[in-house]
Image (tube, rainbow, N blue to C red):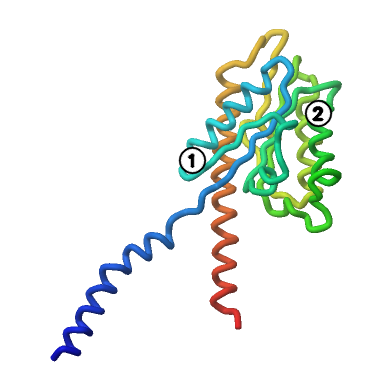
Amino acid sequence: MIQLWRVLLLCVSSLLVWPIIAQAADDPPTINVLVAYHSFSGHTERMAEAIAEGARSVSRTHVILKRVGKVTAEELFAADAIVLGSPVYWSNMAGEMKAFIDDWQFKFGVFPEFKLKNKIGAAFATGGQISSGKELTMLSILAAMLGNQMIIVSGGGAFGASATTEGDSPGIDAQELTGARELGRRVADVAGAVKRGFESLESRAGLSGP
């Protein structure tokens, strides 16, 4: 009789504990998003802040917002998604942004292990005129990310979020800030989906392993 009660207690305990275990297993992972930028006039910084805001709107997303010169190797490698923004200088990214990307290898040592592989990458840019080279600037950033075997996403525009800051559109308008938030949200959403997918694959590999 005592043994029967022990069995019943074990069954009831397992029924009470199992939902808690299942819920913990189904909890989505925390997503780390790094938004790094160079800004001279403050326009690119405003776009970066809007992108960070959009990313934070996705649950369980942690965002680091920094100027490129202050980003550490630990922050770069801990990020699940990296969003880089630059003003347009002669149809290209700013020298500070290029130096930061060069540091991935010369200072941080991403190669030969491809330490940024499968991380989400995205870009944004601000330029004085409508045809000032914003798309070329974003493409040059994305090209560096592709070379590191990152997964590229866009949002807020065909190549990423952008803003025109002079001429007929002085400053950054509400539509451009909305595009920046859209990019941030999409980056966090895709990073979450990719991270859950890889964790699922690793879990299956562990179950089927020796």
Q: Within 10 Å of the Cα at label 1, are there few (<14), some (14-19), or many (20+) other Cα atoms?
A: some
> Could you tell me which residue is drawn at 55 percent across and 50 percent down?
192
Please state which amino acid type lies under the numbered disc 1.
Answer: Val
Please indicate whether residue 19 sits to the left or right of residue 166 in the image: left
Please indicate whether residue 136 sits to the left or right of residue 73 in the image: right
> Could you tell me which residue is drawn at 78 percent across and 55 percent down?
114
**In the depicted structure, whether residue 26 falls above or below residue 206:** above
**In the depicted structure, whether residue 95 falls above or below residue 26:** above
Distance CA(mark 2)–CA(mark 1): 30 Å
Please indicate whether residue 30 sits to the left or right of residue 20 in the image: right
Residue 166, horizontal then vertical, whole percent: 72, 10
Q: What count of labels does the image hold?
A: 2
Answer with the quarter of the image where residue 164 lies: top right
Helix, strand, or loop for circle 1? loop
Q: In terms of sequence position, does the residue under pointer 2 or pointer 1 come before the other?
A: 1
**In the depicted structure, whether residue 98 falls above or below residue 75:** above
> Could you tell me which residue is drawn at 72 percent across and 22 percent down?
39
Please state which amino acid type lies under the numbered disc 2.
Answer: Glu
Helix, strand, or loop for circle 2? helix
The residue at the far left in this view is: 1
Residue 34, horizontal then vertical, whole percent: 63, 39
Which disc number belongs to residue 67? none
Please indicate whether residue 126 sits to the left or right of residue 25 in the image: right
Closer to us: 96 or 194: 96
Residue 162, horizontal then vertical, whole percent: 68, 26
Q: Nearer the viewer, mark 2 or mark 1?
A: 2
Answer with the quarter of the image where residue 118 lies: bottom right
Q: Which residue is mark 1?
A: 58
Q: Which residue is mark 2?
A: 96
Residue 91, horizontal then vertical, whole percent: 84, 24
Q: Within 10 Å of the Cα at label 2, are there few (<14), some (14-19), or many (20+) other Cα atoms?
A: some
> Could you tell me which residue is drawn at 82 percent across and 43 percent down?
107
